[in-house]
Amino acid sequence: MEFDKVIQSLEAGNFKVEPVSDCNCTFDWHFESGKLVDGCDGDDCYEGFTLLVDDDIVADRTRYNAPNFFVNGLSEKDIPEGIWEQMQPPTTVQRWETGNPAVHDARRRDALIAFLMEGGYELARDDERGFANEYTMILRELPDGVFVSVNREEAEAWADAFLYRGDQSTEAFVGFRMESMN
């Protein structure tokens, strides 16, 4: 696309700003020093916005990165401030957010669910002090020869509770404990 056509389209309001995100990380849930960790491999996530003119990407802006321009001669000064504001990815992370794109969090959750369904562990929760936002998630290692089958619904509920980070009004205090019945 030509520079002049892009500028004319931007001035005339003939453009679209669309959100974009992706994650190519891999997850290998395992135990380290008594903790359940995701073993995330890769830092190949992004989220942000693309600027399109006639369905062609002319610029993009992703969280934590400098803007990219896909038209010769186009720079940040050529794009009106109001458009840049529409393309501004969040720069702060709220306490209940992970700071990762939603697709990353969903893939991480799915990997945990698969781990729980394959692991043969009994899933449990200890509400300790009786507060809805303070609890410990438990995996019980069963005696040799004993296997427990975990269905998807149980694994999803356990994973959601384990990954819970709180919300706008409630801070989460989620612990983890591995128990052995050997």
Image (cartoon, rainbow, N blue to C red):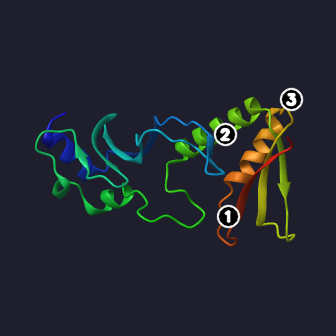
Residue with the mark numbered 1:
166
**Element under disc 3:** loop
Q: Amino acid at mark 2?
A: Leu
The part of the image, by quadrant, that contains residue 171 is bottom right
- Residue at 65% from the left image edge and 37% from the top image edge: 110
Tell me if I can see residue 54 in this picture: no
User: Outermost residue, top direction?
Assistant: 145
- Give the vertical position of 118 relative to 107 (above or below): above
- Residue at 85% from the left image edge and 63% from the top image edge: 127
**Element under disc 2:** helix
- Residue at 64% from the left image edge and 42% from the top image edge: 109
- Give the CA separation, mark 1 to mark 2: 19 Å
Residue with the mark numbered 2:
112
- Residue at 38% from the left image edge and 48% from the top image edge: 49
Q: Is residue 140 left or right of residue 66?
A: right
- Give the CA separation, mark 3 to mark 2: 19 Å
Specify which label sits upstream in the sequence, 1 or 2: 2
- Give the vertical position of 90 relative to 122 (above or below): below
- x, y percent for residue 90: 43, 60
Residue 147 disc label: 3
**Label 1 near label 3: C-beta < 8 Å?**
no
